[in-house]
Amino acid sequence: MASKKQSSRPAVSGSWQAVRNARRSKKNLCISGPGRTRTQGERELVLQERRLRSQESGEAPETDLERAQNLVYEAWELSPTERTQKALRALVVSPRCADAYLLLADSAPTSKERLQLCRQAIVAARAAMRDSNEDGEDLWSRLSSRPYLRARAACARALWDQGEPEAAAEELFELVKLNPGDNLGLRYLLLPLLIQLGRRREAEALARTWDEEPSPEWDFNRALLGFWRRGASAAALRHLRRGMSRNLHLAGYLLGCSPIPRRLPDAITFGEEDEAVDYAARAHAAWAAVPGALDWLAASLFPEQSSALG
């Protein structure tokens, strides 16, 4: 499928004055943590894992945990109600099926209940890992250890949504150590969270680790870090312009010119509005935490008008 051709201007209508008014009203901002236990990308990883497990052990599951895990795999293809029922069945088959708890967490009505289910998933995953007698540094390399990583990642998101960003950051830090390849993409959560918490040195180290990351939100994060360190520098502006060229919608959502829906998108498309919505919901607090950053972003969109109007 051919990619859509983007125009050369950011997708922000109006003027510098309109941008300032939108920012002051804050009516379009719906800012919180990640807003969901897992993304569509992570679900796709789970389905890929199902195929890998079949190749390793054959089609017929041998243990209760394997049978429960197969029920969870089947649940991904069902409606939310049927998915919950299938997850409950999986836990009857094996209470050590961490992914079943995570399916229940996906549909939990409150962030508190979601956090409780994520913690139950961690306990179950640890028990399963103990039974398999595995240990090591990069847990992603073993299929049987991946539910543990998923459970802790879901717990970090739930902590963030619960208003515990410091605890969420510590969870994410530990997960990046356990899985240096960061197959779950947790760096996208961790970097803006570190900026929000004022932990610049750690944020800069993480950004350098993934210096060649080719995504617009990483460009925006690098721009924010550059502005935080040296103000409106040429390097910061270079990152910002590159991010704008890769996704024209990001700035508008960050500035509140476009409304952020309360239900965040499950699937993220490079360069499209769903990517901008997802980033703005997670990163607006980081931009607001750096004095002058949002003003600089707005002024970068309308340089001539901003200098005339002040």
Image (cartoon, rainbow, N blue to C red):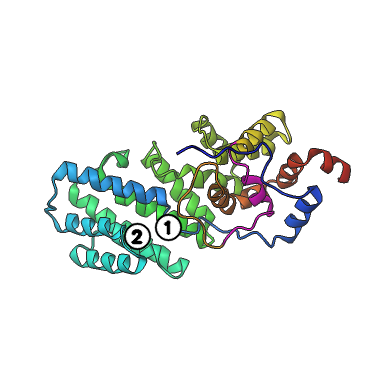
Are discs 2 and 1 less than 8 Å apart at CB? yes
Q: Amino acid at mark 1?
A: Thr
The question of residue 248 being in magenta is answered with yes
The CA distance from mark 2 to mark 1 is 8 Å
Residue at image position (14%, 49%) is 59
Q: For mark 1, give the secondary structure.
A: loop
Give the vertical position of 232 relative to 149 (above or below). Answer: above
* Residue 310 in which image quadrant: top right
Q: Residue furthest front?
A: 2
Q: For mark 2, give the secondary structure.
A: helix
Q: How many marks?
A: 2
* Residue 101 in which image quadrant: bottom left
Q: Name the residue tied to disc 1.
A: 37
**Closer to us: 245 or 204:** 245
Q: Position of residue 270 (x, y in %)?
A: 51, 42
- Magenta-tinted stretch: 246-261
Q: Position of residue 278 (x, y in %)?
A: 54, 51
Residue at image position (79%, 38%) is 303
Q: Name the residue tied to disc 2.
A: 102
Residue 35 placement, left or right of 50: right
